[in-house]
Image: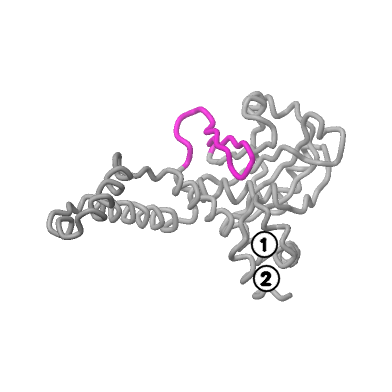
Amino acid sequence: MNRDEAKEILITYRHGTADAADPQIAEALAVAKNDSDLAGWLEMHCARQFVLSEKFRQIVPPAGLKEQIISEHAVNQKAPSLLQRDLKPLPVLALLLILGLLGATWFGAFKRNDTLTIYRSQMATTAMWGYDMTLATNDLHQIRDYLAANQAPANFTLPAGLQKSTLTGCAVAAWHKTKVALICFRTGEAAANSGNNLWLFVVDQASVHNLPKGEHPEIASVNGMITASWVKDGKLYLLGTLNDEQTLKLLL
């Protein structure tokens, strides 16, 4: 299977569902894992799917729309001629309003592809879906040196709670044309085995729009991961964990 064939199959792929069990999709995912360009496209594709699904969940139909449609349908069944003469356009207008809002939502979601929502989803997908931890070490100085040598943010500040977690290494991720520092940790039961369950992403804040407001970290659930986002000294920090929200807050 080549890149184009894999991409065509992955267009229908939904991250976090049973789709990955499909043999064709599993083969396409394997191709993407060994193709950096396809992997980058897939991360953005999954991020956009997440944004759309969130926007769909936020749409609320006008109050009474369901009852109005049912009522007019009943009238239509009993007196078609009367309905044709006296039908009020409210349901049609309401439906058009919903479609208009949906269109505006789609446009708003895609007119920018560098927002915090998409960044957060893409980085969460990177952590969950797979990445190569190119430096394995628990030495913070080595991690900073490696990130600096690879043009990724290295002068970052770890929250006090996070400093108590077990460092495992780092990698460099991509966000548009900007390098992202990925620092990996283990906490809790994961500290006793080889799995990471805590990831910190650091990127230049100028590369992401719609940043968190205020001094407190912004908490959000993304693709099954609990995340916290905050800005400090010109950098955007994104901390993600497979643990619960309370555990995450203790690390900040």
Q: Is residue 110 magenta?
A: no
The location of residue 17, given as percent across then percent down, is: 65, 52
Looking at the image, is 12 positioned above or below residue 252?
below
Region of the chain picked out in magenta, as a range = 211-233
| Residue type highlighted by circle 2 | Ala
Instruction: Locate the C terminus by quadrant.
Output: top right
Secondary structure of residue under mark 1: helix
Q: Is residue 180 above or below residue 34?
A: above
Q: Nearer the viewer, mark 1 or mark 2?
A: 2
146 vs 175, nearest the viewer: 175
* Figure label count: 2
Quickly name the residue at label 2. Answer: 6
| Residue 223 visible within the image | yes
Q: Is residue 41 left or right of residue 209?
A: right
Q: Is residue 215 magenta?
A: yes
Look at mark 1 in the image and give the residue it sits on. 39
